Amino acid sequence: MNIYGVIMAGGGGTRFWPLSRKERPKQLLNLSGKDLMINETLARLLKVTEYENIYIVTNAGQVAAMKKAVDGRIPPENILSEPSARNTSACIGYAAAKIIKTRGDGVMIVTPSDAYVQNETEYANVLKHAAVAAENGGIITVGIKPTFPSTGYGYIKYEKSDKKVNKAYRFVEKPDRVTAERYLKEGGYAWNSGIFIWKASVALDKIKTFLPDVYSDISRISEVVGTEKETERLNEVYPSIRAISIDYGVMEKSDDIRVIEGDFGWNDVGSWDMLNILQKMDENGNIAVGDAVIVDSTDSTVYSENRTVAVLGLDGIVVAETEDAVLVCPKSRAQDVKKIVEELNAKGKKDLL
C-alpha cells in the first residue's frame, strides 16, 4: 500500500499578525522554539511514510520560502504551487491528480500544516490505522477527543461504539459555549482536526460527484500533468476554479465518512491566546517570548521580536512586537486580529500584510 502525505500550506495565518505575513505565514514561523511549524508537520508524517511520498501544496508567493524552509526534507518537485488561493477542494483535487498521474494511486493523508501535536507516536499510530481503513474505500477523518468546551473548533458527531473507526453522522459548525458544553456532556462529538485519509482516486471521485465543476477544471490540469505544458495550464485554469472548502463541498454531503478518534494532544494553535500550548507560562499565567519584561500582570502574552517590551499592571492582554508593527489587544479578542489585517488591506497598507 502506497501512503502519501499531503500538507495544505497555503494559508496566511492572519490571526498571528503582525508576526505572520503573506510571505511569512504561520506555517513558516517557529512558535514553539523548536522548529518551523511546517517542519514539525513534516517530521510527524515521516513516521508514517517516506520523504519522497510527502507533498506540500502552497501558494505561488510562498514557494521560494517554502523550498528554503524544508530544504532536503522532501524532494523540491513535491512542493506544488497554487497560482491563486482557491480553498481546500482545489488544493486536494490538484494534489490527488498530480499523485495519480506521476506516482500511481494510493492512500492520501491530507493534513493542515500548522497544528501542534504532543504525542507524535500515538499520532503516527492513529494515521497508520486510518490508512489501512481507507484502503478499502470511503473517507476516514481524525476526530480529536475534546478536552474542553471549545468554541473555536468545528465538531463531528459520530457513532459511539467500542470500534476503532465509527460512522460520522454530521459536521457541526463552531458552537457557542453552552452548546459546546452540551457536546462534551453527551459524548459522541469530536473536534474536527481537518485531517482526512482517503485514496487519491476516492478523493477525485468524491469531487466529481459533489463538485463537478471543480472536477472538470482539475481534469483539464490533469491532462497535462508531468508535461512541459503543466505550468501554463495550471496558471490558465486554476485561478478560475470555484473556491470552496472540502468540508462544505464534500464532507457534509458524503454518506460514507468514518471517524477515527485521536487522543494525542492535538491543538490548532490559531491565535495569540493559544500560545500557551507551545510556550510555558509563569506562576501568574503570563507568557514572555523574546526580550519581554512582565511586572504585576496576569494571564498576558508578550512577544518581542526586536526590542525590549515591558508591561505593567495588565490582565488578559496580548502585546506582540515586530520590526514594523505592534499589536495590543485583549486575549479575549485574539480571534478577531484578522479584522486588523482586513482594515490594513482596506487602507492600502500592503507593506504590513
Image: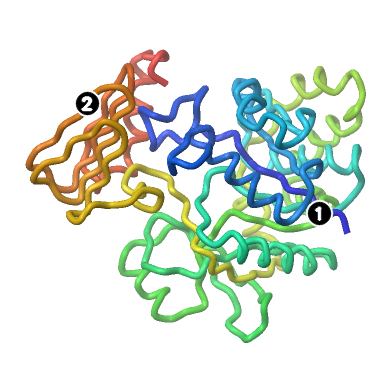
Residue 185 falls in image quadrant: bottom left
Q: Which of the 4 image quarters holds residue 85?
A: top right
The span from disc 2 to disc 1 (Cα, nearest Å) is: 47 Å
For mark 1, does the 10 Å Cα neighbourhood hold few (<14), some (14 to 19), or many (20 or more) residues? many
Q: Is residue 30 above or below residue 350?
A: below
Q: Judge whether residue 84 can be spotted in this image.
A: no
Quarter the N terminus occupies? bottom right
Depth check, front residue: 66 or 160: 66
Question: Can the viewer see residue 151?
Answer: yes
Instruction: Give residue 291's quadrant in the image.
Output: top left
Q: From the top left corner, tell me how far across and down residue 66 is, in percent.
A: 62, 28
> At label 1, which amino acid type do we have?
Ile
Q: Earlier in the sequence, mark 2 or mark 1?
A: 1
- Tell me if 2 is positioned left or right of 72 in this view: right
Give the quadrant of the C terminus: top left
- The residue carrying mark 1 is 3
Front residue of 301/61: it is 301
